[in-house]
C-alpha cells in the first residue's frame, strides 16, 4: 500500500531523480571525521528548533509569568525538563560545534578562493548563533538572566558612536524591563530563526555548488 | 520546471550498486513480513545498502528520542483535570452578608461559589462559578451547573413555568434538569454537595443520564 502511494506521487512529480541527486551525491575521498562539525552544528540546530517550538507551547514572554511558566514546564509537565535541558545543552553544544567547524575550515585553508563568500556567510551565521545564545539567556527571567543581560547590553553600549543607541534599542529604554524581555523573545523566536534559515540555505547551496575544498 | 525534474539521474559509478529492478515477481499478495523476508533474501546486502539501512534506523531512533518527549510534553496538558475541592456556598438558615438565603424549598436560586483555581503556571486565584441551588427539604439539596449541556450557554430559570431555558439554541430543561426540547444531549450537569456545621459546600461537577443517575 505504501509502495503504491509512493508510485502514485512518483508518477506525477518524478521526484526520484531529484532525491537521488541530493542523497546520492558522491563525496570526495579525502574528507575526514573533522569535516563532520558543520553537519553536527546543523544537527544541533535541528534539536534547537524542535525543542524550541515545543517550549513556545508553554512559555509566556512577560515579566509576570515568564519565570513561573518556565518553572512549571520544567517541574510539572512530563518530559518538560528533558525538552528544556535538551534546548539548553544543545545551545552550548551548538556554540562549541560551530567554533570547531570554523577552526577546521580555518586550519584547512578552506576559506580561500573561490570560497570567500561562504566564509563570510559562515561568519554571519556564527554571529547569529551567538545572538541566539544571548537572547535566549534572558528568557527564563531569573536573576542570572537579568544580570547577564544588563551587563551584556552595557558592553554593547561601549561601542563607539552607535553603541549607546543600539543598546537602548535592544533594551527598549534605559533599563532592562518588560520591553527588553519581549524584544529578546521576538529576536530569539521570529527574527533570528529567519536569518539563520536564509544563511543556512546560502551556506549549503554554496558548498554544493563549489564542492568541498581540496586537501592541504 | 517540468523539464528540470524529469532529467535523468547521473549514473552513479560507485561499486556494489545493483541496478534497481522495477518490480519483483511474486511479491504481490503476501503479508508484509513475508515480503520483507523475500526482499532481504533476494536482494544482496551490499555495503551501500547496509550503510543506508543503518543510517535510516539510527535516524529513526534519534527522531524518536527527540519526538516522543516533545509530543508527550505538548499532548499531556490536554488531559489535565481541574479539581475545585470543597467550596462554601452559604450558611444555612443564617446566611452571612452576600450569601443567598437557601431556606425557601423547591425554588432554584441562582448564586455562586468561590474556589481557588490553580491554572498551570498561574498563581492560585479565587474564581467565581455560577450555580443554581435548590433546597429539596429535609437537608437535601440539588446543585445545578448553569451551563446548557449543548454548547455551554448559561441557562435561565423561569418561575412561571418551572423550567430552565437556554438563550442560544432553544434548549429547555424541566425543574429536575431533564431535557424537554432542543438540542441538549443530556440533563443539566450537577455538583456534589455536603452540609457541614450548618454550611453548604459544593464539590466536583458530574453528569447525569436521562434517568438522573450519575454517569461520571
Image (cartoon, rainbow, N blue to C red):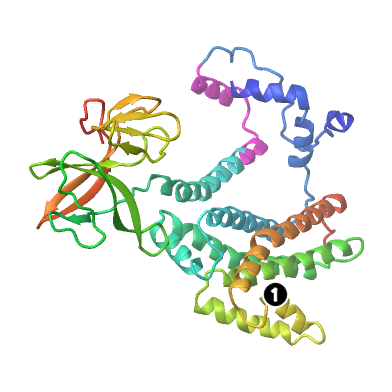
Residue A52 in view of the camera: yes
x%, y% of residue A131? 69, 70
**Split into 4 quadrants, where in the image is the N terminus of chain B?**
top right
x%, y% of residue A91? 60, 65
Q: Residue furthest left?
A: B138
* Secondary structure character of the magenta stretch overall: helix
Q: Residue furthest front?
A: B160
**Split into 4 quadrants, where in the image is the C terminus of chain B?**
top left
x%, y% of residue B33? 49, 23
Location of residue A38 with respect to B108 vertically, above or below: below
Q: Quadrant of residue B177?
A: top left
Horizontal relation, residue A111 to residue A53: left or right: right
Provide the residue span drawn in magenta: B31-52
Which SS class for mark 1? helix
Q: Nearer the viewer, residue B171 or A182?
A: B171
Q: Is residue B85 magenta?
A: no
Q: Chain of mark 1?
A: A
Horizontal relation, residue A91 to residue A130: left or right: left
Q: Which residue is rendered at x = 50% and y = 63% of the image?
A: A85
Q: Nearer the viewer, residue A155 or B5?
A: A155
Location of residue A202 with respect to B5 vertically, above or below: below
Q: Which residue is mark 1?
A: A170
Q: Is residue B51 magenta?
A: yes
Location of residue A126 with respect to B169 vertically, above or below: below
Q: Residue furthest right?
A: A113
Amino acid at each position: 500500500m505504501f509502495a503504491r502511494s509512493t508510485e502514485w506521487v512518483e508518477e506525477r512529480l518524478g521526484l526520484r531523480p531529484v532525491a537521488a541527486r541530493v542523497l546520492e551525491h558522491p563525496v570526495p575521498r579525502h574528507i575526514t571525521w573533522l569535516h563532520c562539525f558543520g553537519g553536527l552544528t546543523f544537527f544541533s540546530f535541528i534539536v534547537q528548533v524542535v525543542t524550541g517550538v515545543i517550549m513556545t507551547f508553554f512559555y509566556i514572554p512577560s515579566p509576570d509569568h515568564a519565570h513561573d511558566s518556565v518553572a512549571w514546564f520544567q517541574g510539572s509537565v512530563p518530559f518538560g525538563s528533558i525538552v528544556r535541558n535538551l534546548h539548553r545543552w544543545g545551545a552550548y553544544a551548538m556554540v562549541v560545534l560551530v567554533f570547531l567547524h570554523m577552526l577546521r575550515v580555518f586550519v584547512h585553508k578552506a576559506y580561500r578562493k573561490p570560497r570567500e563568500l561562504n566564509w563570510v556567510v559562515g561568519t554571519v551565521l556564527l554571529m547569529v548563533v551567538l545572538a541566539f545564545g544571548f537572547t535566549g539567556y534572558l528568557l527564563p527571567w531569573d536573576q542570572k538572566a537579568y544580570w547577564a543581560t544588563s551587563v551584556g547590553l552595557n558592553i554593547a553600549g561601549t561601542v563607539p558612536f552607535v553603541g549607546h543607541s543600539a543598546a537602548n534599542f535592544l533594551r527598549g529604554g534605559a533599563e532592562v524591563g518588560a520591553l527588553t524581555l519581549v524584544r529578546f523573545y521576538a529576536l530569539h523566536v521570529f527574527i533570528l530563526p529567519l536569518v539563520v534559515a536564509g544563511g543556512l540555505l546560502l551556506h549549503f547551496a554554496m558548498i554544493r555548488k563549489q564542492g568541498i575544498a581540496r586537501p592541504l | 520546471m517540468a523539464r528540470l525534474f524529469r532529467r535523468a539521474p547521473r549514473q552513479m559509478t560507485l561499486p556494489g550498486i545493483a541496478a534497481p529492478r522495477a518490480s519483483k515477481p511474486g511479491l504481490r499478495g503476501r503479508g508484509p513480513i513475508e515480503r520483507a523476508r523475500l526482499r532481504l533474501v533476494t536482494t544482496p546486502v551490499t555495503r551501500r545498502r547496509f550503510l543506508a539501512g543503518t543510517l535510516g534506523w539510527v535516524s529513526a531512533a534519534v527522531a524518536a528520542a527527540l519526538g516522543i518527549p516533545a509530543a508527550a510534553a505538548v499532548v499531556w496538558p490536554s488531559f489535565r483535570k481541574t479539581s475545585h475541592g470543597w467550596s462554601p456556598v452559604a450558611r444555612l438558615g443564617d446566611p452571612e452578608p452576600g450569601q443567598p438565603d437557601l431556606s425557601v424549598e423547591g425554588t432554584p436560586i441562582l448564586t455562586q461559589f468561590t474556589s481557588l483555581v490553580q491554572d498551570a503556571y498561574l498563581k492560585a486565584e479565587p474564581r467565581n462559578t455560577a450555580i443554581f441551588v435548590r433546597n429539596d427539604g429535609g437537608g437535601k439539596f440539588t446543585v445545578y451547573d448553569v451551563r446548557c449541556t449543548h454548547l455551554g450557554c448559561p441557562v435561565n430559570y423561569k418561575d412561571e413555568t418551572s423550567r430552565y431555558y437556554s438563550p442560544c439554541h432553544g434548549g429547555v430543561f424541566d425543574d429536575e434538569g431533564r431535557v424537554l426540547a432542543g438540542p441538549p444531549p443530556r440533563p443539566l450537569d450537577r455538583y456534589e454537595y455536603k452540609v457541614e456545621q450548618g454550611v453548604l459546600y459544593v464539590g466536583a461537577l458530574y453528569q447525569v443520564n436521562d434517568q438522573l443517575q450519575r454517569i461520571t
